[in-house]
Image: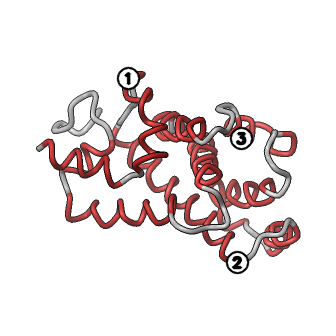
Amino acid sequence: MRLKSLPDDAKVYELFARRPDTFQPFVQTCEQIMRGPSALSRGDRELLGAFVSALNACPYCHDVHNEAVKAYGIAGELAKDCQHDLANADIDDKLKPLFALCRKTTEAAYKVTDEDFKAVYAAGWDDEAIEDAVLVTCLFNFMNRIVSTLGIEADADYLIGAGPRIRDDGYASSLEASIGAD
């Protein structure tokens, strides 16, 4: 069952547009986390978001952000490859311990240990990069739960333009368009 006031084909920004005082600042935070300065490229952050969404079995977020992954020129199967076999996934070896930390953060954050951090540091990442990766992970865990609980789904038509829209215009433009449509 969905919220009675949401249409069956509601998209996340339609939900956000209903509460602009809450979600406009949140979307700006998303912009900063996903598109602001970082040692992680925008494509890597999208891949990490799609990976977390795959771990959480959230098809909406996985599929939408996997389209962004592809728009950044990254292979579309990588998020699920990382989910199923991170050690052998075709991603830069430097990313693997960072993704492993984010997996543990998603599945059982209380089990994160100093050894997890040592592996990430040994791969060449610094505190800021770790913070950025954890912020992406937490952002997607938060959104996966909202989207999954409220039954928001992406259809094929929505997915067609999702990747280039995220890559080219970011997140705030979609919210502004939704608010303007009211």
Where is residue 90? Give x, y as percent.
81, 39
Residue sticking out furthest to the left: 182
Which residue bears the numbered disc 3?
83
Mark 2 or mark 3, whichever is nearer to me: 2
Q: Residues within 10 Å of mark 1 (few under 14, many from 20)?
A: few
Which residue bears the numbered disc 1?
157
Which residue bears the numbered disc 2?
127
Where is residue 88? Give x, y as percent.
87, 40
Q: Residue at x 29, y 32 (%)?
A: 1
Q: Residue at x 23, y 39 (%)?
A: 3
Mark 2 or 3 closer to N-term? 3
Q: Amino acid at mark 2?
A: Asp
Callout count: 3
Mark 1 or 3 closer to N-term? 3
For the residue labelled by badge 2, is the local secondary structure a helix, a strand or a loop? helix
Q: Amino acid at mark 3?
A: Gln
Q: Say left or right for 138 vs 8.
A: right
Q: Amino acid at mark 1?
A: Asp
Mark 1 or 2 closer to N-term? 2
Closer to the camera, 132 or 19? 132
Q: Residue at x 75, y 75 (%)?
A: 126
Closer to the camera, 22 or 76? 76
Work out whether 47 lies above or below 28: above
